[in-house]
Image (cartoon, coloured by chain):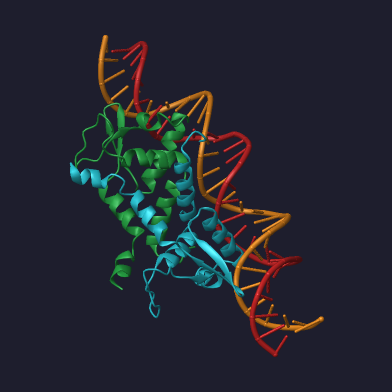
Chain colours: A green, B cyan, C orange, D red
Amino acid sequence: MSNYSNDIHKRAEMFKALGNPHRLAIFQRLSTCCVPGTICSVEDAIRFTVGELGEDLEIAPSTVSHHLKELLRAGLIQSRRNGKNIECWIEPQLLDQLSDFFKVNSDIKQMT
Amino acid sequence: MSNYSNDIHKRAEMFKALGNPHRLAIFQRLSTCCVPGTICSVEDAIRFTVGELGEDLEIAPSTVSHHLKELLRAGLIQSRRNGKNIECWIEPQLLDQLSDFFKVNSDIKQMT
DNA sequence: ACTATAGTTCGATATATGTCGAACTATAGT
DNA sequence: ACTATAGTTCGACATATATCGAACTATAGT
């Protein structure tokens, strides 16, 4: 368990964080651009407040907070205070990185 | 927790399974084609026996077995007996599906 | 039939996780 | 200063997980 590359550990942490349905729902909401009524651009990641993220989850605010801390710890999301709210978002490059993880060798395969 | 779409649950199960460093190492080994000395083709997924998969992990065979059961349950890997061995592999389309999950809206973003 | 090899199942145990409510901190508006 | 709103931190607790070794099943070769 301890003689792995840090890469594996880091990534396992990410997947563990995504391994809870509530957290995955939060992550998915943050990764979904072009929500109806939302203006969507390439540069700006979509942002949601903690309250918004917990809205349809039917769990206590303290639990939402806990889950967000896990997502932060794993490096999956970013957050920043804006007035009374804490805004959360996902760096687009993170999505690219995760997407690439699952096609490590698909390019190599194409070449053979 | 119970009023989510099955999709989210199913996928969370997958990520939970990948959230353990040992299982992620196993998964990575199975998803890695073109290992030195290996012939790699587009059609055939690479196969490893249970023993091979546990080789560098330094955990008991029973633990390897447990982890493989988790990966199977999550639908991440396939397995089949071949003589004394159980061979494991990953369906390439699963990797595509997982890769796509993280770029749900990147195409939409490109279009705006 | 016996033996060796490859994996699995089972029970035990220590540790991690998800959840809550209550009490707390931080900001904004009056 | 007071109040309301937005989140967080802190125990507590029930449940899930990772791990092991021992005992088991399955196959192949002799």
Q: Is residue C17 left or right of residue B108?
A: right
Where is residue A67? Give x, y as percent. 43, 39
Is residue B49 visible to us here? yes
Where is residue A108? Give x, y as percent. 30, 69
Of residue A27 and residue C14, the one placed in the foreground of this image is A27
- Viewport quadrant of the C terminus of chain A: bottom left
Q: Is residue D27 left or right of residue A102?
A: right
Of residue B32 and residue A2, the one placed in the foreground of this image is B32
Question: What residue is shown at x 46% (from left), y 38% (from top)?
Answer: B5
- D12 vs A106: above or below: above
Q: Is residue B24 left or right of residue B70?
A: left
Question: What residue is shown at x 49% (from left), y 60% (from top)?
Answer: B77
Where is residue A5? Give x, y as percent. 40, 65
Residue A72 quadrant: top left
Question: What residue is shown at x 31% (from left), y 33% (from top)?
Answer: A48
Q: What is the residue that sits farthest to the front in this orientation? A: B43
Question: What residue is shown at x 43% (from left), y 34% (from top)?
Answer: A64
Where is residue A73? Give x, y as percent. 38, 46
Is residue A4 visible to us here? no
Q: How many marks?
A: 0
